[in-house]
Each structure stands twice: as C-alpha cells, then as structure tokens.
Image (cartoon, grey):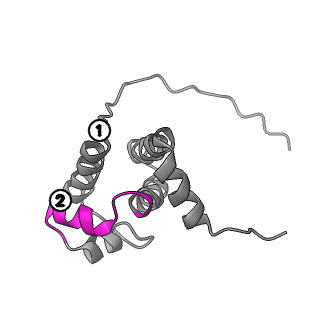
Amino acid sequence: MGLTRNFDETVRSRAQRDPKFREALLKEAIEAMVGGEVELSKALLRDYINATVGFKSVGTAINKSPKSIMRMLSRDGNPNVNNLFSVTRFLQEDAGVKFKVVSAKAKRTKMNVEV
C-alpha cells in the first residue's frame, strides 16, 4: 500500500501544529550532529527548516543565500563548522530553545558473534 501523503507535507503539517514535535525534530538534528552522524543531522535540519522557518529566513539571519544553505545541507554538502553552528544557533533562537551538551558515559555492549 502506497503512502497517501507526501512525507514533507506530513512533517510540515505536524510541525506547524505541534510545538513539541518541532522541538524534538531540532533536538534530534543537533544530537545527531554532536554524535558524529553528519548526514542524518543535515537531513533532519533540512526537514526542520522546510517545515518551519524556510531557507530564506535562515539565509537572511546568517547573511548567506538560501541556495547556499540548501547546498550546505544537501547530501553532497560539506558545511564548515562556522556556517553549521550559525544555522543551529539561529534555529534555536527562533524556536526559543537552547540546547546544551551534557557528557554521559557511553554504554559498551559486547557483541556475541557466532561463526
């Protein structure tokens, strides 16, 4: 059975009506970035921007063209840390949230591999 609604439309609709969803989407993007999952982080940031403020607002806020922001967050994009943090700083300010990094010990699990 196929999807009846476009994924982007679904995310946008939910983000517009649910502040907790918007915050969770932004939080997940930043956690992915801090965790070294750059591709996932870029995808989540694209989804968040498309569902909320739009690339034009982000570009204006950080003095970059919207197309530059789109390229930076594309699959092949390679944003520098200053630009990436400028984007996330603006998104946090716009959302009225501020995330902080808290250290936690990573859980180590043994892998049981049978041959």
Residue closer to the observer: 84 or 35: 84
- The amino acid type found where label 1 is placed reads Gly
As displayed, is residue 62 above or below residue 108? below
Give neighbour class at mark 1: few <14, some 14-19, many 20+ (Cα, 10 Å). Answer: few
- Looking at the rendered structure, the secondary structure element under dot 1 is loop
Where residue 105 sits: x, y (%)? Answer: 47, 22
Q: Where, quadrant-wise, is the C terminus in this rendering?
A: top right
Confirm or deny contact between disc 2 and disc 1 (CB under 8 A): no
Which residue corresponds to mark 2? 61
Give neighbour class at mark 2: few <14, some 14-19, many 20+ (Cα, 10 Å). Answer: some
Q: Residue at x 47, y 55 (%)?
A: 44
Magenta highlight on residue 55: yes
Report which quarter residue 69 is drawn in. bottom left
Instruction: Tell me the tag on residue 24.
Output: none
As displayed, is residue 22 above or below residue 49? above
Where residue 25 sits: x, y (%)? Answer: 48, 46
Residue closer to the observer: 57 or 35: 57
Q: Residue at x 49, y 56 (%)?
A: 40
As displayed, is residue 45 above or below residue 108? below
Residue closer to the observer: 72 or 14: 14
Q: What span is colored magenta in the figure?
A: 50-64
Instruction: Tell me the tag on residue 96.
Output: 1
* N-term mark: 2 or 1: 2
Residue closer to the observer: 114 or 39: 39
